[in-house]
Image (cartoon, rainbow, N blue to C red):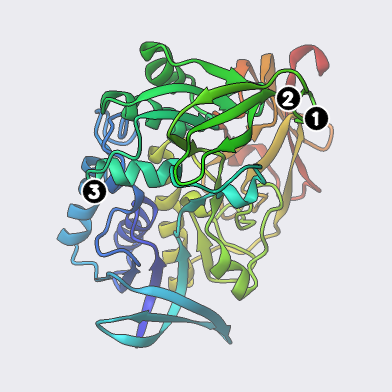
Amino acid sequence: MKHDIVIIGGGPAGLAAAISAWESGVEDVLIVEREPELGGILNQCIHNGFGLHTFKEELTGPEYAARFIEKAEQLQIPHWLSTTVVDMQRQGESLFVTCVSRERGLQVVEAGAVILAMGCRERPRGALNIPGTRPAGIFSAGTAQRLVNLEGYLPGREVVILGSGDIGLIMARRMTLEGAKVKCVAELMPYSGGLKRNIVQCLDDYGIPLKLSHTVVDIQGKERVTGVTIAQVDEKSKPIPGTEEHIPCDTLLLSVGLIPENELSKAVGVELSPVTNGPQVNESLETSIPGVFACGNVLHVHDLVDYVSEEAQQAGKHAAAYVRGAAAQGREIPLKPQGAARYTVPVSLCPQRMGEQLVVRFRVGRNIRGGVVKVFAGDKLLYQRKRPVMAPGEMEQVVFQKAWFTGGEAEIRLVAEEEEAQ
């Protein structure tokens, strides 16, 4: 069995990439999705706030996903549901994707190009080394969200949330609306990992305290959680003796970060970023393996699904160009983050392939007030923009212009820093 493009993942990234590839002239596209329905994580995100950039209106997660599902069905793009990709290999010019499902058994699909759109997963408790017993009542925030929104279960009545990522903030509000009492949200870092709007709408509006530079140092309970102990941490994230505070509760939700789902990427030899844990990609969103592209949260964790769709559309377009043999040739120029910028996506660019504009996304590693973003080629300043506030929880972007580059640059530097530090 052979398809021009195989897309692994049927969430917002996979759907947008499939539609974009079809509209770019490659209609032989297959979506492989391990869940029994398309839509990915959006199916359990019943809160609003989606689609403001893409559709210029506010939608819930399922409504946003439905727009793309309907479009994919109109185009009659085939999709395999309840199907897991277990292996991917490159042999010569072709990629071979091995899938397994109850309906089809074991299938090997030959692909001209593959788009990775597997999304991300939550970091589990085991990665945190929280001391204490292991009673019932400890959930990741995403699991709690699924239990409440899709399965109709309330995980607990008195809740402490560790981590202030967006899903943790949203679940603080969701649990409150369902009648639970959220005692506090504790955050290890001195800043929140979520969007400012979510802090306001999900915590401030409901009087839920946010304790920065705090973490859980003990969990009490035998059969069920009966309480947790939180403590303040120092600049090295070590608990400060004497700052412990016991909080009675029956539930602990963990919102301690998301990890791009890249076991499959590693198996095929895709080079990963040590910062994002996602693939290293060029301006076409092509990984270190020719013909393998990546987009969405498998590439780097986004804060808005609108940006996931936008990025996925580019991946679909470039994968289609690759399959058609229409991708331009040229030298890749390294793109280096400096100052407070932790990483960039992409990590390199080829002016001949980038089109007239290229959106480069990045995150900073600390809160910055009175900041500036600059782009240099060597010592030549190409771009400068003031940013009054930059925070780790909010993705930043710069729109690169093709006219900036000659193709002969040794490297490009993206610098984010306080203005006076420049």
SS under mark 1: loop
Q: Which of 9 and 55 is in front in this view?
A: 9
Q: Residue at x 33, y 73 (%)?
A: 83
SS under mark 2: loop
- Tell me the CA gap for discs 3 and 2: 37 Å
Does residue 160 sit above or below 204 in this rendering? below
Left or right side of 209 for 243: right
Does residue 355 sit above or below 394 in this rendering? below
> Which amino acid type is marked by label 3?
Glu
Left or right side of 218 for 19: left
Mark 3 residue crowding within 10 angstroms, few (<14) / some (14–19) / many (20+): few
**Looking at the rendering, in which quadrant would you find the C terminus?**
top right
Q: Which of 401 and 225 is in front in this view?
A: 225
Any mark on residue 233, and which? 2
> Which amino acid type is marked by label 2?
Val
Q: Which residue is drawn at 75% across and 18% down?
A: 242
How far from the left and from the top, in percent, is residue 20?
34, 56
Label 2 close to label 1 by CB (< 8 Å): yes
- Tell me the CA gap for discs 2 and 1: 7 Å
Q: Can residue 236 be seen in this view?
A: yes
Left or right side of 120 for 400: right
Instruction: Point out the tag, 3 or 2, that comes first from the N-terminus.
Output: 3
Residue on which the image places disc 3: 151
How far from the left and from the top, in percent, is residue 421?
82, 17
Residue on which the image places disc 1: 236
Q: Which residue is drawn at 36% across and 85% down?
A: 2
